[in-house]
């Protein structure tokens, strides 16, 4: 096979009204059809969307808001597409003889791994561990991958997954960052909702080079071995496709049959104030004895995405910490003010190199979220919900402490928290998607009553096995009364 270019080949897996096909980027951008990205894993679907967004961001960067609105409103002309891709035609060829997409031609590693190693969360074929098979829909070993699937997996592995350990580098955003993308009416419009204008980029990336030959991806301008640099010095285009490892795919015909990898030896120095700004991730900062430290939002617990809604939507600068939304959300707020917001939030929860959980959630926020009143009410709703959860958890911990672990109540507070998240999710999603944020006071009372009832129900459910024993019952009665008092106090505030 002579080449596999993401600008010209059919590589995007989609379905329309139950019919599956693979389409080209040209067909996607130059038509308005009811396509949906369709793969066997939700994380791969999000990676495919993110990859498309990054390619369009680089190749078809709109100059200003007017250009972006026009691109959003109607399909691109095929002649404009063909003209636009010409300067970048060598950037995105998976099988390019000199510059293979996100690969390095001089990988020295002699061992060729199974292509299964590309698939985040799935162990290598030779691994004796079967625990991570739960992250894949088919538990059989993967002997080969189609070129388009391998491309998406290669991108996802570099940008979104923790490093494989053993000295391999993490992505520019850290071990397992959360990615936040906006969803619109059609797949084509979804792409453009996540594209930054040149004006926005020039504002937030002071070292942005307008000429692409000065801002090349790592497979065309190799990272210098043993080099040291600050991450914010990395170019905008280069950072979107940052590849922290040397990887070379083994291809046979139209299939990827293996891969080899080698560690990079560069060093990212401590940034004095900021790190490379990724447009698709919420950012957090804290001020400690070593100065200001910036990180990207990641899934460190099993808590659902709504618990991070304040970090995702609202900028706050406090004395010792703060957070700000991704650039795509900030730009969308200014460009489409007054609209509702639909988000995909995805990533992995990891323990070092091990993937513990695959995360992929949808959130819809009703219109009005983008003004001061709406944002204050969103902050209050999230804080209120977490207060109810915390009181339930604390009181369950009190029961467990009094009854004793030998009676089977170890982890009782964790069970209660998990049940709260599970049973409150539909309620909270319903409120944030339908709330009139300007009139939130009229509905918040009902919301409080619902969470109050939920917390008491979960407490009673978990206490049921112990109430038959008189020596436990007295603790349960006392702490149930304390829970009711604490819930009532929350409802009065």
Image (tube, grey):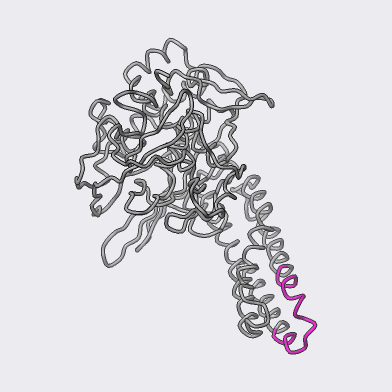
Q: Is residue 235 magenta?
A: no
Q: Residue 247 in the image: x percent, y percent?
A: 35, 38
Residue drawn at x 29%, y 50% is 274
Report the side of 161 relative to 447 (left or right). Answer: left
Q: Is residue 469 magenta?
A: yes
Report the side of 335 relative to 358 (left or right). Answer: left
Secondary structure that dominates the magenta span: helix
Image: 171 above or below 151? below
Tell me the quadrant of the picture where the N terminus can be found: top left
Snapshot quadrant of residue 35: top right
**Depth order, front residue of 153/142:** 142
Q: Residue furthest right?
A: 468
In this rendering, the count of numbered labels is 0
The span picked out in magenta is 458-475
**Depth order, front residue of 434/465:** 465
Residue drawn at x 67%, y 48% is 430
Can residue 473 be spotted in the picture? yes
Residue drawn at x 46%, y 40% is 114
Image: 97 above or below 273? above
Residue drawn at x 59%, y 50% is 134
Report the side of 351 relative to 270 (left or right). Answer: right
Q: Residue 272 in the image: x percent, y percent?
A: 23, 54
């Amino acid at each position: 096979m002579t080449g596999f270019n993401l600008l010209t080949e059919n590589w995007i897996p989609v379905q329309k009204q139950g019919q599956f096909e693979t389409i080209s980027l040209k067909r996607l951008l130059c038509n308005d059809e009811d396509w949906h990205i369709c793969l066997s894993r939700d994380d791969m679907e999000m990676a495919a969307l993110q990859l498309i967004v990054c390619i369009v961001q680089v190749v078809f960067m709109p100059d200003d808001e007017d250009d972006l609105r026009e691109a959003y409103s109607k399909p691109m002309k095929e002649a404009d597409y063909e003209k636009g891709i010409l300067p970048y035609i060598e950037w995105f060829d998976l099988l390019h003889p000199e510059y293979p997409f996100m690969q390095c031609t001089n990988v020295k590693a002699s061992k060729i791994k199974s292509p299964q190693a590309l698939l985040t969360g799935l162990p290598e074929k030779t691994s004796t561990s079967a625990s991570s098979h739960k992250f894949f829909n088919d538990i059989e070993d993967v002997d080969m991958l189609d070129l388009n699937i391998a491309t998406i997996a290669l991108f996802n592995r570099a940008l979104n997954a923790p490093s494989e350990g053993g000295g391999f580098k993490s992505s520019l955003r850290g071990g397992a960052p959360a990615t936040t993308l906006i969803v619109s009416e059609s797949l084509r419009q979804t792409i453009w909702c996540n594209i930054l204008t040149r004006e926005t980029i020039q504002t937030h990336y002071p070292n942005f080079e307008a000429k692409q030959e000065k801002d090349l991806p790592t497979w065309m301008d190799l990272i210098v071995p043993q080099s040291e640099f600050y991450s914010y010095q990395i170019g905008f285009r280069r950072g979107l496709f940052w590849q922290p490892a040397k990887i070379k795919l083994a291809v046979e015909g139209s299939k990827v049959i293996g891969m080899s990898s080698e560690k990079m030896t560069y060093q990212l120095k401590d940034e004095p104030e900021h790190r490379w700004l990724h447009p698709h991730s919420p950012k957090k900062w804290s001020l400690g004895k070593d100065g200001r430290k910036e990180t990207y939002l990641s899934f460190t617990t099993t808590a659902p995405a709504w618990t991070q809604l304040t970090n995702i939507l609202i900028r706050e600068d406090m004395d010792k910490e703060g957070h700000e939304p991704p650039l795509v959300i900030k730009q969308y707020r200014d460009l489409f003010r007054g609209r509702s917001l639909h988000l995909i939030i995805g990533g992995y929860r990891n323990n070092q190199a091990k993937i513990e959980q695959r995360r992929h959630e949808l959130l819809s926020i009703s219109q009005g979220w983008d003004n001061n009143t709406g944002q204050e009410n969103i902050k209050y709703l999230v804080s209120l919900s977490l207060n109810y959860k915390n009181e339930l958890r604390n009181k369950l911990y009190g029961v467990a402490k009094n009854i004793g672990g030998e009676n089977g109540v170890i982890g009782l507070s964790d069970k209660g928290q998990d049940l709260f998240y599970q049973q409150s999710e539909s309620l909270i999603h319903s409120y944030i998607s339908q709330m009139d944020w300007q009139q939130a006071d009229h509905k918040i009372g009902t919301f409080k009553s619902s969470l109050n009832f939920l917390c008491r129900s979960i407490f009673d459910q978990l206490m049921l096995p112990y109430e038959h024993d008189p020596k436990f019952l007295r603790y349960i009665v006392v702490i149930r009364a304390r829970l009711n008092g604490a819930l009532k106090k929350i409802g009065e505030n």
